[in-house]
Amino acid sequence: MGVSPNVGEIVATIREYPKQSLIALDFDGTLAPIVQEPTMSRLVTGARDVLDGLASHVGTLAIVTGRPAADVVRLAGLSGVPGLQVLGHYGLQTWY
């Protein structure tokens, strides 16, 4: 069994090879807090700015969600993030 890299090594690799890197994030509980009414989900403060910045520097930026992809794009206002991919229903749907 191999040794997992630490966060510092991962960040260093992304910095060295940004256009070959994939950053995939979960929506509920990571980019947006878990809320009782799912239609009230919103990105945490500052997340949109971070996503905009990452999108222009890495090869692929993706959000993975159990929700329909279009719902997350609409709820989070993500339609303007360049190159963002949203994988809905855990990858059964793709929004570009």
Image: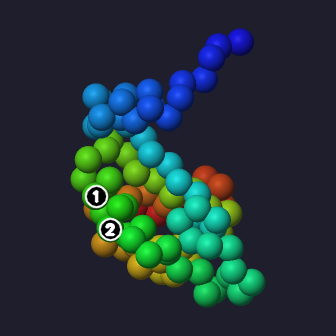
- In terms of image quadrants, where is residue 46? bottom left
Report the amino acid beneath label 1.
Answer: Gly
- In terms of image quadrants, where is residue 41? bottom right
Q: In screen coordinates, is 6 left or right of 19?
A: right
Label 1, label 2: how far apart the Cα atoms are: 6 Å
Q: Residue furthest left?
A: 56
Report the amino acid beneath label 2.
Answer: Asp
Please state the horizontal and vertical placement of residue 94, each as a whole percent of the image: 51, 58
Vertical placement of 61 versus 67: above or below? above
Say which residue appears at 38% left-offset and 46% top-offset: 60
Q: Residue furthest top?
A: 1
Say which residue appears at 63% left-offset and 67% top-offset: 28
Viewer can see residue 88: no
Q: In screen coordinates, is 36 left or right of 72?
A: right
Please state the horizontal and vertical placement of residue 16, each as a whole percent of the image: 28, 28
Circle 1 sits on which residue?
A: 53
- How is the model colour-coded? rainbow
Res 30 label: none
Circle 1: element type: helix
Q: Residue furthest right?
A: 36
Say which residue appears at 71% left-offset and 86% top-offset: 37
Neighbours of disc 1 within 10 Å: few (<14), some (14-19), many (20+): few
Please state the horizontal and vertical placement of residue 50, each as a whole percent of the image: 35, 61
Q: Cβ–Cβ below 8 Å for labels 1 and 2? A: yes
Q: How many marks?
A: 2
Circle 2 sits on which residue?
A: 49
Q: Nearer the viewer, residue 26 or 80?
A: 26
Quarter that holds the N terminus: top right
Please state the horizontal and vertical placement of residue 32, each as a whole percent of the image: 57, 71
